[in-house]
Image: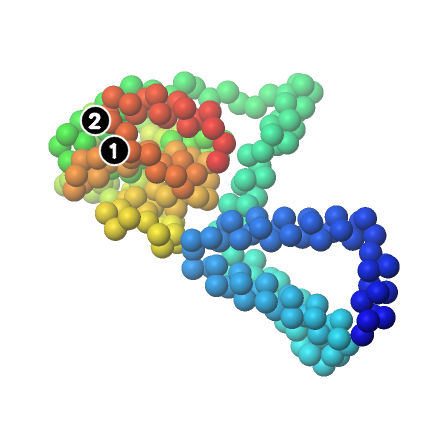
Amino acid sequence: MTELFVNAFIQIRVWDILDVLLVGLLFYGLYYLVKGTTAIKIFFGIVAIILGLKVVTALHMELLSYILGAFVNVGFIALIIIFQPEVRRFLLGIGNTKIADSFKNLIAGLGLRYKEEDSLDLNSICEACASMSQDKVGALILLTQENNLNEIIETGVSIDAIISKPLIENIFFKNSPLHDGAMVIANNKIMAARCILPITQNTHLPGSYGLRHRAGIGITENSDCIALVVSEETGSIRIIKGGKVYDVKASEMKAKIKELSNKRN
């Protein structure tokens, strides 16, 4: 046994140490993504199986190694399906890094320009939210960033109208057939209303957060959009970006939206 450990240490290279560090970093990133969700128990189970596979392989337990190895190989596709929201958030995070920005700048330098979006009419949006807050009318509005949320828009009713305070208020009026669900604003237009959003799996949210808040958190966890939520019960206004919730006053909305628009998830 002593000879086995001595030989193992003699064969360790710098690249082996780097390999271990990178794997550890990868596992830490996965843990960070699933922390606070129901997927955390599955994550720990996977880690236990992988460590068990390494142990039984080192001990030359061939039958158990074959069984665990087959489970890991076949279960890889199933894990992608199980962790689909987390994988999507992970890839979105990569796309929001400085490396991705450098790639865009390179393309721009080659003469391939990205389409410039019209300036967003924040005044009408903030005034509508302030009015709905005062009247305690519930609302959920998504402001797109780089991700245009086409898959979300397709779940709702197409509007494709210029942004205006009266239109926003009419859509979220309690007796309106479009008041349930979310409104999506993109390219300075109200693209759709009554859109269906994914609900966050975070189990550590305050009990006061209703379905609108949980939907707003869920969509911002899986995209780079900004969600505006007006509470129907209290009239409070909350802005959500990257799963983080910010309580704001009506007078602070415009400045906070501009601040978050310049931040990465």
Residue 150 visible in image = no
Residue at 35% x, 52% y is: 204
Could you tell me how many numbered marks the image carries?
2
x and y, in percent, of residue 212 in the image:
28, 44
Q: Secondary structure at mark 2?
A: helix
Dot 1 lies on which element?
Answer: strand
N-terminal of the pair, mark 2 or mark 1, is 2
Can residue 56 be seen at all in this image of the molecule? yes
Q: Residue at x 31, y 40 (%)?
A: 182
Q: Residue at x 72, y 81 (%)?
A: 63
x and y percent of residue 42 in the render? 51, 64
The residue tagged 1 is: 237
Q: Nearer the viewer, mark 2 or mark 1?
A: 1
Q: Position of residue 263 (x, y in %)?
A: 47, 28
Q: Which residue has dot 2 on it?
A: 130
Tell me which corner region of the image, top left, top right, bottom left or bottom right, holds residue 217: top left
> Label 2: few (<14), some or many (≥20) within 10 Å?
many
Q: Which mark is residue 51?
A: none
From the viewer's perspective, is residue 6 above or below residue 154?
below
Task: Report whether 103 appears left or right of 156.
Answer: right
On the image, the x and y values in percent for residue 118 come to 43, 19
Quadrant of residue 112 within the rendered picture: top right
Dividing the picture into quadrants, the one containing residue 191 is top left
* CB within 8 Å, label 2 to label 1: yes
Q: Nearer the viewer, residue 256 or 227?
A: 256
